[in-house]
Image (cartoon, rainbow, N blue to C red):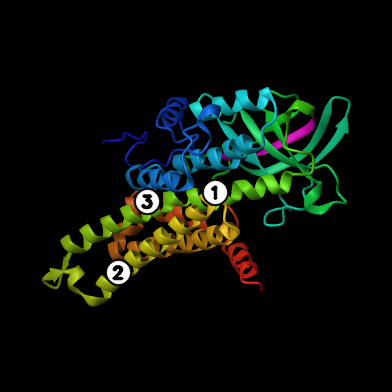
Amino acid sequence: MTVEFPSSPVSDQPGYSRQDWARLGRLGLLGTAVPADSGGSGLTAQATAELLTLAGEVCHDTGMLFAAAAHSFACALPLARFQSTGVHDRWLRAMCSGEAIAGCGMTEAHAGSDTSRLATTASPVTGGYLLNGTKSWVGNGPTADVYLVYATTDPEAGHLGTTAFLVERTDSGVRPGQAHDKTGLRSCPVSPVHLEDCLIPDERVVGPVGAGAAIFAYSMLWERSCLFAIYVGLQQRLLGLCVDHVRRRRQFGRAIGDFQAVADRVVAMKTRLESGRLLLERACLAIDEEADDAEGRAALAKLVISEGVVASALDAVNLFGGAGYLQGEPVEHILRDSVAATIFSGTSDIQRRLIARELGL
């Protein structure tokens, strides 16, 4: 079966079209693991990862795939798990079909890895909550129709004082900022979202009040596994580019792949790829079986895949030499799209902390 993904061969534009987004919906990439009775495909974590691995390999627009995965795992999937009202269900179906674009509002200027100290507040008023604050890094921020926003409802309760809200772009007091000019993943627009006296009715509270940390942790469990399937596919594509190059490129009268130093780099790329693939499979199996160690397995998969793709992209640049350093060339583009992988969804240091905790350290 041939799957036609929307994108040009190499996309470096700051955004995607609504037509491309709708096509992602038709391909089932916007609600992969959302139950079918809520508009999704109802796939397991393992099947979701297989689909996104394929997408990462054959679709050259990694930024758009990242936008779709963030929409799916940080917004649609937690909404499916914790929804309780008709408003939630209507938005969820629109997210899965591609009619609506969603963004997750968690990160703030002074709350990145530490999400227990959100400056964005939600004050109870008659009929709902009044939200005030700024989310500094919202994927799909400039284009989103709806946001899953986390805010502090009880500053004394730590993680139990955070609540999730469904915020519509048209709500009074919602103001998306200008898109950040990023090094990579440029076709996924990211921006601040400002909230000023934004009234959110009770029916758009997601899950119980105070359950925001648990909801976010659930979304990160899926994001740290299935989103990184895109990077497994990307590594597969990168490996293919390098194998073809070292077979064709000749120096000193022979293919450069004949030189041990060159072959060793390619073998290292293959090793990283297969290590990440196997760890991803184990993480997804743990999610599907609701295993106690699912969080640790997802952290391990995320750590190995993210650091592996950056290392392999750097190796690829060296294998291609000057051609690998030219802006717009596939290898250079892949490097820029890879660098952020060790940062978003929790930095590598945070993943190591989670893994250490699983070990009882």
Can see residue 189? Answer: no
Residue 54 seen from this side:
yes
Labels 2 & 3 near each other (Cβ < 8 A): no
Q: Amino acid at mark 3?
A: Gly
Residue type at mark 2: give it: Val
| Residue, far left | 253
Residue at image mark 3: 233
Mark 3–mark 1 distance (CA, rounded to whole Å): 15 Å
Please give the name of the residue rendered at 37% of the width and 52% of the height, measured from the top-left corner: 234
Q: Residue furthest bottom?
A: 260
**SS for tag 2?**
helix
Q: Is residue 169 magenta?
A: no
Q: Which residues are magenta?
A: 189-198
Q: CA distance from mark 1 to mark 2?
A: 28 Å
Q: Are marks 3 and 1 in contact (CB under 8 Å)?
A: no
Instruction: Please state if 142 lies on the left or on the right of 113 as rendered.
Output: left
Residue 311 pos. (x, y %): 42, 65
Q: Position of residue 274 (x, y in %)?
A: 36, 62
Q: Residue at x 48, y 36 (%)?
A: 42
Which residue position is annotated with label 2? 267
What is the quadrant of residue 60 in the picture? Answer: top left
Considering only order in the chain, which callout, 3 or 2, is on the residue closer to the N terminus? 3
- Residue 332 in percent (x, y) is at 37, 54
Q: Residue at x 88, y 29 (%)?
A: 125
Mark 1 crowdedness (10 Å alpha carbons): few <14, some 14-19, many ≥20: many
Q: Is residue 256 left or right of residue 339?
A: left
Please tell me whether mark 3 sits on a helix, a strand or a loop: helix
Q: Please identify the dominant SS of the magenta region.
A: strand
Q: In terms of secondary structure, where does tag 1 sit?
A: helix
* Disc 1 target residue: 223
Distance from the alpha carbon under mark 2 to that under mark 3: 17 Å
**N-term mark: 3 or 1:** 1
